[in-house]
Image: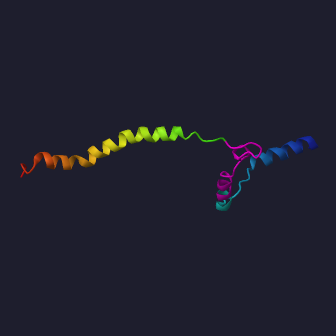
Amino acid sequence: MSPVIARAAMRAAAMRTVTRRQFSMIQSMRSFARSFESHPFERLPVSTPTHALDWSLPIKGLAKKSALYFPFMAVFLGWPLVAATVANGHIQ
């Protein structure tokens, strides 16, 4: 058999036998933990200052939510008091 054919047969035999690594819980946890490592695009720049936060946006959002939340909770929690005042002992 020629060396070229022998080499091709050896490669084909090597491709057929697939080697599998055993499952390692430590390695899978390590790769999971490495996925949380910071990357260069997540790091804070040293040469430029950080961007200032526009506080008007969170305050406006809080005001909009409060305009609906507090009246709704007053009605939701205050209806028994209103019902007791309206009924005024007429319901037995």
Q: Which residue is drawn at 68% across and 54% down?
A: 34
* Residue found farthest to the right: 2
* Residue 6 position in % (x across, y down): 89, 45
Is the image coloured rainbow, by chain, by secondary structure, or in one colour? rainbow
* Residue 41 position in % (x across, y down): 71, 43
Which range is magenta?
29-50
* Residue 79 position in % (x across, y down): 22, 46
Q: Is residue 16 left or right of residue 59?
A: right
> Is residue 40 a member of the stretch shown in magenta?
yes
Q: Quadrant of the N terminus?
A: top right
Q: In this view, does 17 lie to the left or right of 8?
A: left
* Residue found farthest to the front: 56
Name the foreground residue: 20 vs 86.
86
Write down the quadrant of residue 72 in the picture: top left
* Residue 43 position in % (x across, y down): 71, 47
Write down the quadrant of residue 2 in the picture: top right
Placement of 80 over or under 57, stated as above or below: below
Name the foreground residue: 80 vs 9.
80
Write down the quadrant of residue 68 in the picture: top left
Q: Residue at x 84, y 44 (%)?
A: 9
Q: Which residue is drawn at 66% across and 51% down?
A: 35
Placement of 46 over or under 56, stated as above or below: below
